[in-house]
């Protein structure tokens, strides 16, 4: 038994549903971007306490003990040299709970890179959502096409890759060099005219 073809109203209803799903998916992609950025910010703001890991705690205690002994030797030597305690040099150690993310400049740069990466991820997701939606809608609409000419028209549409070829570094460099060459040629002409 063959399955009956979809009616026009069924195709229209399904197309409408697919467009709605596409909008919801794009909204979800934007929400996901916000979530990814919030997660990144949490990682960026993370500080580590020496006592949250037994290895760190042991190492910090050993360093503190070593520095205390070294400081005692420095104090004894200062006393021998007649350096008053208030002017004596010293040695100290402390736990530093952050890495490069402690510097505001580093955080700003990492945040900028993360935002750019998240925007790229979202743009790719949105493109895939749109492509999937169009592909599904196309299948519905192709089912309703009755002529080969109409089908050939749809199949003949160019791809994005064909319309937007990849950049070539050498071509970009040549494009940059062309205006400089023209400027230097016109500059040479102006100098020669001025000398005459």
Image: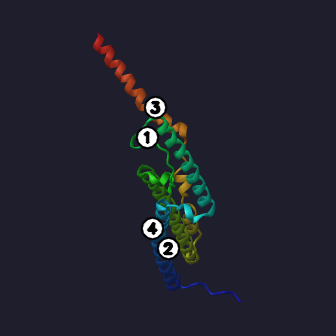
Secondary structure beneath disc 1?
loop
Mark 2 nearby-residue class (10 Å; few <14, some 14–19, many ≥20):
some
Residue 22 image position (x, y, % from top left): 49, 74
Nearer the observer, 143 or 20: 20
Q: Quadrant of residue 180?
A: top left
Q: Is residue 156 left or right of residue 41?
A: right
Nearer the observer, 6 or 185: 185
Q: Which residue is mark 3?
A: 177
Q: Is residue 83 left or right of residue 141?
A: left
State the mark number for residue 88: 1
Q: Is residue 117 visible?
A: yes
Q: Earlier in the sequence, mark 3 or mark 4?
A: 4
Q: Earlier in the sequence, mark 2 or mark 4?
A: 2
Q: Quadrant of residue 161?
A: bottom right
Q: Residue at x 53, y 72 (%)?
A: 133
Secondary structure beneath disc 2?
helix
Q: Nearer the viewer, mark 3 or mark 1?
A: 1
State the mark number for residue 34: 4
Quarter of the picture containing the N terminus is bottom right
Nearer the observer, 149 or 118: 118
Q: Earlier in the sequence, mark 1 or mark 4?
A: 4
Q: Earlier in the sequence, mark 3 or mark 1?
A: 1
Nearer the observer, 100 or 51: 51
Q: Residue at x 45, y 56 (%)?
A: 111
Q: Residue at x 56, y 60 (%)?
A: 156
Mark 1 and mark 4: Cα distance apart in space: 53 Å
Mark 1 and mark 2: Cα distance apart in space: 66 Å
**Residue pushed farthest top?**
196
Q: Earlier in the sequence, mark 1 or mark 2?
A: 2
Tally the numbered discs: 4
Q: Which residue is mark 2?
A: 25
Q: Nearer the viewer, mark 1 or mark 2?
A: 1
């Amino acid at each position: 038994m063959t399955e009956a073809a979809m009616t026009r109203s069924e195709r229209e209803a399904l197309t409408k549903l697919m467009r709605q799903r596409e909008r919801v998916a794009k909204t979800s992609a934007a929400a996901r971007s916000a979530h990814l950025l919030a997660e990144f910010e949490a990682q960026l703001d993370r500080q580590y306490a020496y006592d949250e890991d037994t290895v760190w705690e042991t190492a910090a205690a050993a360093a503190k003990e070593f520095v205390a002994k070294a400081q005692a030797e420095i104090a004894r030597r200062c006393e021998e040299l007649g350096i008053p305690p208030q002017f004596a040099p010293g040695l100290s150690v402390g736990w530093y709970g952050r890495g490069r993310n402690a510097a505001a400049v580093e955080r700003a740069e990492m945040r900028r890179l993360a935002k750019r990466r998240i925007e790229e991820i979202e743009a790719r997701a949105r493109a895939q959502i749109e492509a999937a939606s169009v592909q599904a809608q196309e299948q519905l609409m192709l089912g309703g096409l009755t002529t080969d000419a109409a089908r050939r028209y749809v199949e003949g549409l160019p791809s994005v890759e064909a319309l937007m070829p990849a950049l070539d570094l050498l071509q970009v460099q040549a494009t940059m060099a062309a205006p400089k060459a023209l400027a230097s040629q016109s500059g040479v002409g102006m100098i020669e005219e001025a000398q005459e």
